[in-house]
C-alpha cells in the first residue's frame, strides 16, 4: 500500500495544472472537514431551524408583510423540512469531496444522499399536514410517508452491506499512474464544486424570487451521471481491462437509477432507489468474486487515496 506522503511526493511529476488543482482541492477539503467548519455547519443548521420556527409563528400571527406571508408556510413542521434541506446541501458537498478518495465510496455517498432525500420528502409531506394534526386529515398521506421512510431505512441497510463488501485495491501498481488518476479526479471534483455553487445560486433565485419549485437535487444528480461517465473514460488511460470498465460503468448506471428515483411518483421512487442500491451491492459482490478470473489481480479498482 502506498501512503499519502508518497503519493504527495509523486505530484512533482504531474503537469503544473494538475498540481495546482490538487493543492487547491486539498486545502478546500481540509477547511471543509476541519473541526471549526463542523461547528459552523452545526450552528448554521440549528440557527436556520430556530429562525424558520420563528418566521412561521410570525406568519401565523399575521406579522409578516403581504409579499412575504404568501410564500412562507403556517405549519411549524415545515421548519424541519427547511433544516433538512440545508443538511442535504452539506451532504452534497461531502459527496463531492469523497470522489477523489474512492469512486466506490463516492457512489456510496450518493445512496446516503438518496436515503436522506427520501426522508426529506417524508418531512415535506408532513409539513403539509394541518395543525392540529387529525388522523382524518392525514390518513391518505400516511402510506406515502411510510413508503419514503421505509425505503430510506432499507437503503441504509443495503448500504451497510455495500460498504462492508468493498475491496479498495489500486487501479494500477504504477504509483505515478495512481497519483495522476487521483489528481484528475480532484480536478473533476473542483469542477463539480463550481457547478454545485452555480446550480445552488440559480435554483435559490428561482425559488425565492420567481416562486418556482426546487429542482436542485435532480439537476445535480444529472450532472453526476456525466461525471461518472467521465471517470469511466479517464480510467481507460490507466486500465482498459473489461472488469474495471464494467465496474465503473455499472456505478454510472446506478447513478442513472438514482436520478430516475428522484422524479418518480410515490412508492415507485422508494422502490427504484432500493433497486439501485441492491444493484450496486450485487455489482460489488460480483466484482469481488469474479475479478480474479477476469484479469490480473495487480490492476484492480482504485484505493481510497
Image: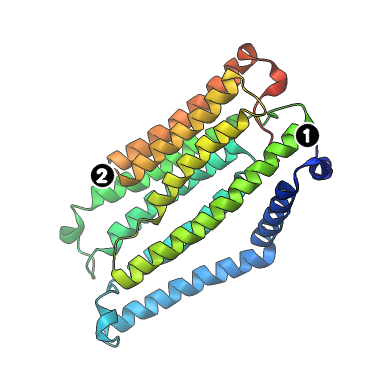
Q: What residue is disc 2 on?
A: 265
In depth, the one of 145 and 232 nearer the eye is 232
Residue 267 image offset from top left, x and y in percent: 27, 41
| Residue at image coords 32%, 83% | 58
Mark 1 residue crowding within 10 angstroms, few (<14) / some (14–19) / many (20+): some
Residue 78 image offset from top left, x and y in percent: 33, 67
Instruction: Classify mark 2: helix, strand or loop.
Output: loop
Residue 176: which numbered mark, if any? 1
Residue 289 image offset from top left, x and y in percent: 58, 17
Mark 2 residue crowding within 10 angstroms, few (<14) / some (14–19) / many (20+): few
295 relative position to 198: left or right: right
165 relative position to 276: left or right: right
In depth, the one of 162 and 239 nearer the eye is 239
| Residue at image coords 36%, 79% | 55
Query: In the rendered view, would you say 168 is above or below 152?
Result: above
Quarter where residue 131 is shown: bottom left
Residue furthest top in the image:
293
Amino acid at each position: 500500500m502506498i501512503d499519502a506522503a508518497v503519493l504527495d511526493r509523486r505530484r512533482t511529476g504531474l503537469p503544473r495544472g494538475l498540481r495546482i488543482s490538487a493543492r487547491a482541492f486539498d486545502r478546500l477539503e481540509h477547511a471543509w472537514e476541519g473541526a471549526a467548519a463542523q461547528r459552523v455547519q452545526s450552528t448554521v443548521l440549528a440557527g436556520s431551524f430556530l429562525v424558520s420556527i420563528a418566521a412561521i409563528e410570525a406568519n401565523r400571527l399575521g406579522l409578516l408583510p403581504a409579499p412575504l406571508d404568501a410564500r412562507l408556510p403556517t405549519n411549524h413542521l415545515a421548519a424541519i423540512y427547511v433544516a433538512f434541506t440545508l443538511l442535504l446541501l452539506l451532504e452534497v458537498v461531502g459527496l463531492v469531496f469523497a470522489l477523489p478518495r474512492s469512486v466506490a465510496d463516492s457512489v456510496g455517498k450518493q445512496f446516503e444522499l438518496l436515503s436522506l432525500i427520501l426522508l426529506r420528502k417524508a418531512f415535506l409531506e408532513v409539513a403539509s399536514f394541518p395543525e392540529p394534526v387529525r388522523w382524518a386529515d392525514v390518513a391518505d398521506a400516511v402510506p406515502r410517508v411510510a413508503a419514503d421512510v421505509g425505503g430510506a431505512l432499507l437503503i441504509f441497510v443495503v448500504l451497510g452491506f455495500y460498504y462492508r463488501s468493498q475491496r479498495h485495491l489500486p487501479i494500477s501498481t504504477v504509483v505515478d499512474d495512481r497519483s495522476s488518476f487521483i489528481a484528475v479526479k480532484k480536478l473533476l471534483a473542483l469542477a463539480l464544486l463550481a457547478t454545485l455553487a452555480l446550480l445552488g445560486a440559480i435554483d435559490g433565485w428561482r425559488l425565492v424570487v420567481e416562486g418556482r419549485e426546487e429542482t436542485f437535487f435532480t439537476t445535480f444528480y444529472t450532472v453526476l451521471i456525466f461525471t461518472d461517465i467521465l471517470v469511466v473514460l479517464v480510467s481507460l488511460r490507466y486500465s482498459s481491462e473489461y472488469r474495471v470498465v464494467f465496474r465503473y460503468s455499472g456505478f454510472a448506471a446506478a447513478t442513472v437509477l438514482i436520478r430516475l428515483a428522484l422524479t418518480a411518483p410515490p412508492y415507485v421512487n422508494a422502490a427504484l432507489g432500493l433497486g439501485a442500491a441492491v444493484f450496486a451491492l450485487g455489482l460489488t459482490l460480483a466484482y469481488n468474486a469474479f475479478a480474479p478470473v477476469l484479469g490480473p489481480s495487480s490492476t484492480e479498482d482504485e484505493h481510497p487515496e
